[in-house]
Structures are given as C-alpha cells and as structure tokens.
Amino acid sequence: MKKSIFFCLLLFLMSLSLPLSAQEKGDNLQEVKRISQLALSSFSNLITESNFKKYGFASTKDITVATIGEPLKTVMIRLDDLQKFEEKSDPKGLLKKTDHFLCPVEVGEETMSSITVAKIKGQLKAVKFGGSNLIQQVAKERLQSDKTEVMKNSPYFILTIPAFNFRALAFESEEELMLTPLFAQPALALPAGDMITMTQLLDVLVPAAKEHNGLPR
C-alpha cells in the first residue's frame, strides 16, 4: 500500500515538471477550442453599444462573425521556486503547468479579443471574456516570431510570473526556451517585444526574486 502511494506521488511530482512537448500531448487543445467556440454566444450576449470597444471590437457586429483561433496554454513560474533556483538547475524545472488556456477571438484575419478557458473540478469552462490588450499584443509578437528562423514547429504558450506581473509569449527552440515579454518591465529593465532566452530572463529575475517581499506588483 505504501509503495502504491509513493508511486502515485512520484508520478504527480514528475508531471509538474514535464517538458512542454510532453505536456502538449496531454492537453486536449481541440476540446479547449470547441468549448471556446460554444462560449461565443455567451460572449455575444455581453456586447452592447456602450462596451464593444472595451472588449476590443470595432463594432457590435464583430462578435456575430467572430471565430476562435488556436488556443495557447498558460505556464507559470512561482516566486518561491525562483527564490530557490540555483545556476546549475534546469530552467525548465521552474515551469508549472496550469489549467488555463487563452483562446483568440478573431474577426477575419485580425485578433480582436479573447476567451479564457479553464479546467474547473475536472471540466473545461469559459471563465473570462475580453482581455483585448493582452491577446492583441500576443498576436503582434506571434506574427514577428513567425518571421524569424528561430521559431520552428514548437507550439507557442503564455509564460506568466504573477509575482512580477510578467507575461511573455514563449516557445521551445532547439537549444532552449525563447520568450518575448508582452509588456515592458521598467523595474527589471525588460522592454516589451525583445526576444530573449530563458537564461537571460533568469539572470534578471533570480536576484530580484531573492529581494521580493512576496506582495503582488
């Protein structure tokens, strides 16, 4: 019995630090997309003449012809893990899978808004509508990354570090994780839109994490 419990615990801990390619196989992104497509009708009910711009649309008619783009999974790095990180450690071990997915809402070829889908008590549900600033920035940086030779066939994902209010568009290259900060971080001297490696990010974040007081920023 004890061996069985230990084995289950070991599998759980290993799943938290699986390489992103392995995690990708376990994520049913097509089901996430299906859920977000169904949620478009609920999103439509929220749009009025007074708030359509807030949600990122050019008119109230946009939502009636909107479609869903390819979902992006969200991966997180915790503050306590950054504080314990050592130079010899594998940076990929910092990445923690979440059950949140950002689904672009597109009108034609333009990304306007988004629907966030999350797994709640084992079921995928649409939990948030909007976030136009974030998803439009994602679309912009994704377009730029597609033009580089660095980007191969690795899927994009969103990297978030809540303690620093940091979000980046990320993917795995053949050598290491590559990411582009979506919003400028003046306190960390990280401009938006400049692609950097995970190693470069950690050179900045690890010292800052050790001085972090634990409060949101």
Image: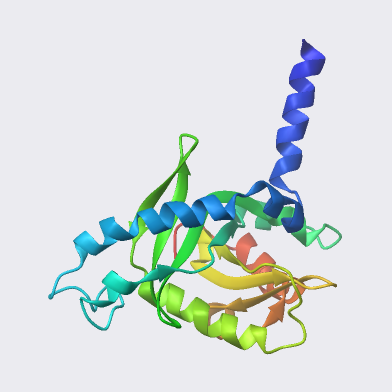
* Relative horizontal placement of residue 121, taking residue 113 as reference (left or right): right
x and y, in percent, of residue 131 in the image: 37, 69
- The residue sitting at the top extreme is 1
Where does the N terminus fall, quadrant-wise?
top right
In the picture as drawn, the residue positioned furthest to the front comes out as 65
Q: Position of residue 185 (x, y in %)?
A: 52, 79
Q: Is residue 85 left or right of residue 43?
A: right
Q: Name the residue nearer the viewer: 2 or 211.
A: 2
Q: Is residue 119 above or below residue 82?
A: above
Q: Is residue 143 above or below residue 90?
A: below
Q: How many marks?
A: 0
- Residue lying at 26% horizontally and 83% vertically, measured from the top left: 58
Q: Position of residue 56 (x, y in %)?
A: 31, 77
Residue at horizontal 48 percent and vertical 62 percent from the top: 102
Q: Is residue 69 above or below residue 196?
A: above
Decide if residue 167 is on the left or right side of residue 36: right
Applied colour scheme:
rainbow
Q: Residue at x 37, y 74 (%)?
A: 132
Q: Name the residue: 28% across, 77% down.
A: 62
Residue 200 position within the rendered picture, expressed as x and y whole percent measured from the top left: 73, 76
The C terminus - image quarter: bottom left
